[in-house]
């Protein structure tokens, strides 16, 4: 059995250490950088913890949107659902607070 | 024989002696001010004896940063712009003198304006902004004065000719930016936003002078009032609503989403100020189109910055994290285009 903590868990405790023990000791000028480091660690931990993401040919989709293939109202409504799903999955890694704040429509 | 003076500080001191017609007795407090990544602002206190400028002055020297990019205006152009908008009554640091001495980098000297710029403080700290409606109105009034500057009546040839259809011109420009990013520029939500902007574009509009980065964080507030607008490097001709949409966009409210006018105050106070100072009467609904465009623009810039890190051109945690702002901007684009 593997007893070493997984990557996401290591990042979590390392981030707590940074925010609780190190950050208060830093001069004001360095705190912004420390917060950026903490943010990067949180993003990386969420990325490690998430499941496999759906595959979709975004290049082809992008080209179709630009060419007006999804303009018709019925098409557009369908497309918006697809786009919401795509962005929601990336927000879950980059900034999940947005989803919490808006109630995840 | 004279040794060529290349150090900026020495050049400034010598230059001030020439233009002020007095003796530069001392130049102290040479301090880098927080400013753009493209230009460098240095604050100085200068004591001059004799001549019309005798006395002690607090000035700012603006020069190119070592990592200057080609997309922004030159110092000479920026000096001409500041002079034009200052004459139009826009609150800016008063431009004083321009020094062009090729091949050395150009710089100019302007008055130093006191005040606070940090966006996250201005939106939260009521001691900095005791009357939020008043400051929002100041910002609207000031923008209206800027928008009185029109292409035909001004001498700013480096801004090029005004686009006949600014929204189509913007859509084409952002598409081209995405295309030049290659795989990093493949983004269906931004394509959706751009297509939406293309389909909802209005007709031809009269172009006015835009600041193009008029937002909280880019102006100084002193004793609760607008003291000066900074960072003019993106100014150009376009639709007046573009500047208002950029100012209102949620991504520039610094977390104070309910205060539509830049996280500072209500949209109504800003728009009242705008209409009261010679701008046209604009409704909040009319700004939605350019709020969509604002989020697209910020997303494109964020992708470009992230690409600088990804490509290895400039390894930087800050640039790498910028990519993670993009999904939030996409979400807002989807919200704004939901029912239209």
Image (cartoon, coloured by chain):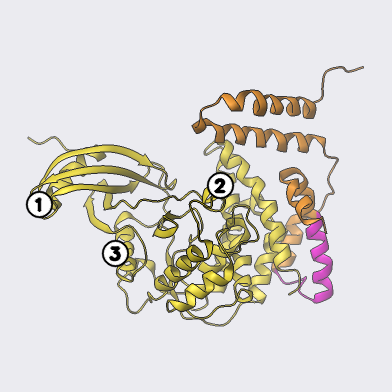
CA–CA distance between discs 3 and 1? 21 Å
CA–CA distance between discs 2 and 3? 31 Å
How far from the left and from the top, in percent, is residue A84? Answer: 79, 58
For residue A75: magenta? yes
- Outermost residue toward the bottom? B203
Q: Which chain carries label 3?
A: B
The answer to whether B46 appears left or right of B117 in the picture is: left
Question: Reading the chain from its start, which is encountered first: label 3 or label 1?
Answer: 1
Q: Which chain carries label 2?
A: B
- Badge 1 marks a residue whose secondary structure is loop
Residue visible at 74% across and 47% down in the picture: A97
Q: Mark 3 points at which residue?
A: B83
Q: For mark 1, does the 10 Å Cα neighbourhood hold few (<14), some (14 to 19), or many (20 or more) residues?
A: some
In the picture, one chain is orange; tell me its letter: A
Question: How many badges with numbers are in the image?
Answer: 3
> Is most of the magenta stretch helix, strand or loop?
helix
Q: Nearer the viewer, residue B259 or A4?
A: B259
How far from the left and from the top, in percent, is residue B113? Answer: 34, 53
How far from the left and from the top, in percent, is residue A102? Answer: 77, 56
How far from the left and from the top, in percent, is residue A88? Answer: 79, 52
Q: Are marks 3 and 1 in contact (CB under 8 Å)?
A: no
In the picture, one chain is yellow; tell me its letter: B
Q: Name the residue under label 1.
A: B21
Q: Name the residue under label 2.
A: B305
Question: Reading the chain from its start, which is encountered first: label 2 or label 3?
Answer: 3
Residue visible at 82% across and 35% down in the picture: A49
- Badge 3 marks a residue whose secondary structure is helix
CA–CA distance between discs 2 and 1? 44 Å
Question: Reading the chain from its start, which is encountered first: label 2 or label 1?
Answer: 1
Query: Picture quarter containing residue A69?
Result: bottom right
């Amino acid at each position: 059995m593997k007893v070493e903590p997984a990557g996401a868990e290591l990042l979590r405790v390392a981030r707590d250490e940074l925010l609780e023990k190190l950050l208060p000791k830093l001069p004001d000028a360095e705190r912004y950088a420390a917060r950026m480091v903490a943010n990067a660690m949180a993003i990386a931990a969420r990325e490690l913890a998430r499941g496999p993401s759906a595959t979709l040919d975004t290049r082809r989709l992008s080209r179709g949107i630009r060419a007006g293939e999804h303009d018709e109202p019925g098409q557009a409504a369908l497309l918006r659902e697809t786009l919401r799903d795509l962005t929601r999955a990336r927000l879950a890694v980059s900034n999940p607070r947005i989803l919490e704040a808006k109630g995840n429509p | 024989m004279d040794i060529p003076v290349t150090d900026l500080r020495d050049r400034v001191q010598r230059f001030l002696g020439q233009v002020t017609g007095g003796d530069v007795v001392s130049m102290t407090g040479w301090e880098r001010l927080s400013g753009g990544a493209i230009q460098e602002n240095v604050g100085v206190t200068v004591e001059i004896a004799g001549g019309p400028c005798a006395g002690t002055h607090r000035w700012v020297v603006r020069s190119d940063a070592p990592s200057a990019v080609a997309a922004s205006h030159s110092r000479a152009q920026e000096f001409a712009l500041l002079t034009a908008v200052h004459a139009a009554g826009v609150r800016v640091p008063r431009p004083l003198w321009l020094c062009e001495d090729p091949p050395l980098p150009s710089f100019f000297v302007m008055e130093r304006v006191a005040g606070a710029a940090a966006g996250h403080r201005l939106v939260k700290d009521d001691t900095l902004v005791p009357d939020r409606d008043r400051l929002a109105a100041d910002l609207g009034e000031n923008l209206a004065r800027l928008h009185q500057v029109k292409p035909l009546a001004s001498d700013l040839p480096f801004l090029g000719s005004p686009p006949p259809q600014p929204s189509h011109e913007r859509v084409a420009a952002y598409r081209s930016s995405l295309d030049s990013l290659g795989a990093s520029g493949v983004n269906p939500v931004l394509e959706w936003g751009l297509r939406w902007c293309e389909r909802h574009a209005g007709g031809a509009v009269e172009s006015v002078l835009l600041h193009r980065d008029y937002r909280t964080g880019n102006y100084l507030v002193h004793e609760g009032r607008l003291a000066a607008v900074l960072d003019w490097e993106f100014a150009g001709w376009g639709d007046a609503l573009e500047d208002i949409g950029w100012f209102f966009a949620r991504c520039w409210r610094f977390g104070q989403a309910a205060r539509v006018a830049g996280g500072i105050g209500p949209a109504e106070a800003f728009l009242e100020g705008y209409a009261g100072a010679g701008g046209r009467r604009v409704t909040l609904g009319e700004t939605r189109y350019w709020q969509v465009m604002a989020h697209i623009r910020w997303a494109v810039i964020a992708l470009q910055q992230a690409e600088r890190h990804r490509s290895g051109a400039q390894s930087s945690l800050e640039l790498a994290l910028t990519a993670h702002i993009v999904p939030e901007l996409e979400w807002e684009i989807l919200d704004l285009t939901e029912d239209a």
